[in-house]
Image: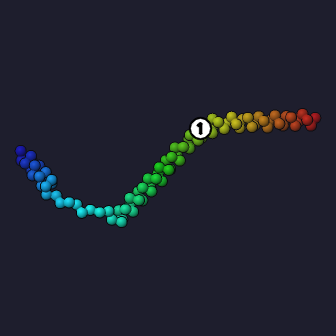
Amino acid sequence: MRILVMAAVFIFFSAFGAYPAMAYIDPGTGSVIFGAIGYMIAAGAAFIAIAIKPVKMLYNRVFKKNKIDSEVEAEIEEKALKDKTEI
């Protein structure tokens, strides 16, 4: 029971005895906020760059491989045509 009375007194004085806060953001705090925003942007860019790399590698493996194979086949056919014309 005593704890309830103490809690009620604490709540009463906390609610009605508080003065308005005279707070402001000083220049040091503002620069810290801008620095934190810059670090967040840099971290996001690094995360995106790291996350996109495997996707690029997969894309290159799937689509560029066929292109390279066709280029190699074209070179082989071109060499074969040159050999036939030289004979």
Quick check: 83 above or below 4?
above
Q: Quadrant of residue 27?
A: bottom left
Seen from the viewer's position, the closer of residues 84 and 14 is: 14
Residue at coordinates 66% horizontally, 38% vertically from top-left? 64
Seen from the viewer's position, the closer of residues 30 and 47 is: 30
Q: Which residue is mark 1?
A: 58
Left or right: 19, with 38 as reference point: left
Residue at coordinates 83% horizontally, 36% vertically from top-left? 78
Q: Residue furthest bottom?
A: 27
Picture quarter with the C terminus? top right
Quick check: 15 above or below 23?
above
Q: Residue 32: x and y, percent?
A: 38, 61
Left or right: 14, with 33 as reference point: left
Amino acid type of disc 1?
Leu
Quick check: 45 above or below 32?
above
Seen from the viewer's position, the closer of residues 44 and 50 is: 44
Residue at coordinates 29% horizontally, 63% vertically from top-left? 24
Residue at coordinates 53% horizontally, 47% vertically from top-left? 49
Picture quarter with the N terminus? top left
Q: Residue 59: x and y, percent?
A: 60, 38
Secondary structure at numbered mark 1: helix
Q: Residue furthest front?
A: 20
Q: Quadrant of residue 66?
A: top right
Q: Residue 80: x and y, percent?
A: 85, 34
